[in-house]
Amino acid sequence: MKMMDPTLAEMGNHLSDAMKILESGKLESEQGKERRKLSWKDFPGPLQGDGQDVVSILQLVQNLMHGEDEKQGHRMQYVGEQGHMALLGHSLAAYISVLERERLRKLTTRILSDTTLWLCRLFRYENGSAYYHEDDCEGLVKMCRLAINTHYEDYATEGFTVLSSKPPVIYQSAASRPGLGQHLCSQLGLPLSSLCIVPCNTMFGSLHQMDVALLDKLIRDDRESGKLPLLLIANAGTPGAGHTDKLSRLKELCVQHNMWLHVEGVNLATLVLGQVSSTVTAATKCDSMTLTPGPWLGLPAVPAVTLYRHEDPALSLAAGLTSSQPVEKLRALPLWLSLQYLGHDGILQRIKHASQLSQQLLEHLKTLASIKTSVEDELNSPVVVFRFSQDGSTPSSGGSVKGNVAEERDILDALNRWLGEQLAQQVPLSGVDVVELEDEGTCVRFSPLMTAAALGTQENDVAALVEKLGEMIPVLSCTLRFRQDFKDEVLQQASLSYIEDQSWPGLGVVRYEARSTDLDEDKRQYRVEKINSDLLKKLMELDTDLYFSDGPEFCEEKNCIFIGMATEDLDVAELVETIVSIGKDIEESGKFFENMTEVVRRGIQEAEQQLQKANEEKLMEEGVLRQIPLVGSVLNWFSPVQASVKGRTFNLAEGCLDSTEPVYSVKAQMNKEASLDSPKSVTKQFPGQKLFRRHGAGSDSVSDTSSVSHLEESFRETAHVQAIDAEEAEVPQEHHVHIETETALSDQRVPEGQETESVDALR
């Protein structure tokens, strides 16, 4: 082995450098980036015959890891030196496996015994054995097989036929991981009737702890019915809220009924600390426990460990807990390297740091109003679960949440879901997430034991989390108070419909309804869709703090406007009136454009009739001789006809032709210039002032006139300008079409057929 030391050290350096390069993403040059943009594809290509060098292969791996997300940054977490040791262990395991069998056996035995001894001492589990596995459920499956082999002596020879005479029963808390019991039955080949879900306490104690008295009754009932109580799964830190079952009483119950007790949970990590809660310390007396040191210590790709006690090595071998293959024992190598690199003090420091972060957050949450915590042991709990609640919020007059309890809970769940998502987005290093609890509802969870080591969470991150939370609580309280006010205002408007959606975290949902009743259902739906789409665009262009959207991606309600969170100075009445005003203008403009086609068609027909009548009058006035081309020219030369021009104007508003004076064009130009020079009504808004804010609330400036009326005038004028633009697109010459006919010409004769050209041009 001494000759291998330089080789192993050199290999370790190369692997460490390669991992750092892959993490940094700085392997390729600028020329390589340009070439990748031109040649890199997402589909596999043929295997090259002459092979590739190491740099090219690492380049390929780097491209697969990072892709083209240079602007978004790398999505890999920082693993640190201890993480590199864990990753190095997987490469060393493959390298060590090529040793001769005897030397490999001695090496794997040493690695396995060292790691097992260190873990048993760290987690106070005396005289224990260890099973290392990749899937965190695999250890529990092996424990069930061990319990089956222990209780059924003929299981190794008779198989499942032994179980049919006395079916085994596995007991699981209702607060355990979802799907865990079903996975066990699937792996063990047992029916789902072998799984018993034990409810949590409903009358006394924590709502997340297993009901011990009810469990005792269930076990006795199963024994009387000819079943065999096999194994009990307890929690030292439930997946949701981090609560710990009464492990001491559960252990006594398992000893009484000769059952196997298995414990799992995040709170088992606190066993390495000097001061441990007595409820968690009781886990050291259980028959087995599953540990996940990877997330606790920030170690990637290290196996989970199940510590257990059993005196018969033959039964352990039959259950698959031990193996004669030395290569399988190398699973512990990454953990063996990482534990040595961290040392006892390093491991203790990481667990202690995570616990202190939880206590820091819990102390700050106690000072915040409207925040309810769900913590079992405030002195030692490493998991903090909190929730915004309407308790403690100041209700406004008429603004309290009405409805039954289920609706109120749905609204609060939506607000807390929004709160958790915003905190996770704005303070990503905190590692908070949203969790659904059966009793409390939607909550925000802070579990630094599972996230702090990988994210590098520090005290300043918790302080930033508390600061953001303090900023969001007033927004949540105002939104909760104004929801009913907003609903009442909307219901008073005939043109608006209020959409009940308790899952929307905001002020509410509205829809503008078309007032026309002469349309069929398809046309009405199309008009509603068009109006609400244009209304949403108009609202999004306003200078306001409110958030407007068309709802979530998979929302059932369509053609609606979703309004986001509210602030303290929100004027709900002004908001609703503005929505109605803009929607009404859009609807009227839409009706005008829809009728314009019919108006133009009728106007063209009338113009044709009047032009035809004018031609007939011209013929009667000039005579037939003047219509002959050569004769008409001679007559016009000797005896010119005094032509009288009769102007016509096409009124789009009324759809008819009107008479006009010869000076109409001059007057129209003067009117147009005067209209351009005239001042338009605009909303009086001070610099920095947002719309929909009550006067005197959150602002020292007060407008001279009501902003609602000015808003209506502004939006109406915008719609009027849009209508004029549309008219110009349909019919040239601004707002009117001038049709002039001449009854006489002094110097020329109108050729035959020329009188119809104006009609064709109009068409």
Image (cartoon, grey):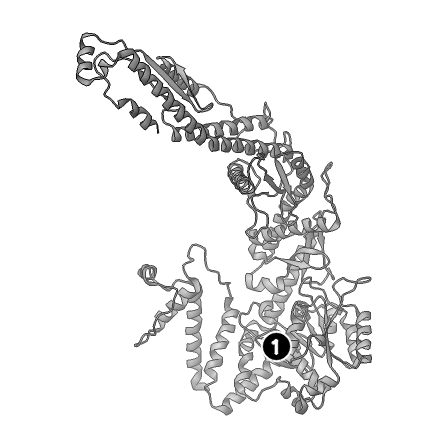
In this view, 327 is above or below 355? below
In this view, 485 is above or below 404? above
Q: Residue at x 40, y 23 (%)?
A: 606
Q: Nearer the viewer, residue 29 or 354?
A: 29
Q: Position of residue 442 (x, y in %)?
A: 67, 55
Q: Position of residue 299 (x, y in %)?
A: 55, 70
The mark total stands at 1
Q: Sort mark 1 into few (<14), some (14-19) or many (20+) by Cα contacts within 10 Å.
A: many
Q: Residue at x 59, y 50 (%)?
A: 556
- Residue assigned mark 1: 138
Left/right of residue 476 with respect to residue 99 in the rendered view: right
Q: Quadrant of residue 143?
A: bottom right
- The quarter in which the C terminus is drawn is top left
The residue lying furthest to the front in this view is 624
Q: Nearer the viewer, residue 396 or 659?
A: 659
Numbered disc 1: secondary structure: helix
Asked if residue 685 shows in the view, the reply is no
Asked if residue 360 shows in the view, the reply is yes
Q: Position of residue 526 (x, y in %)?
A: 52, 41
Q: Nearer the viewer, residue 678 or 566?
A: 678
Left/right of residue 208 with respect to residue 113 in the rendered view: right
Residue type indicated by callout 1: Glu
Q: Residue at x 56, y 71 (%)?
A: 342
Q: Quadrant of residue 140?
A: bottom right
In this view, 233 is above or below 439? below
Q: Residue at x 22, y 13 (%)?
A: 625
The residue lying furthest to the top in this view is 639
Q: Position of residue 409 (x, y in %)?
A: 71, 51
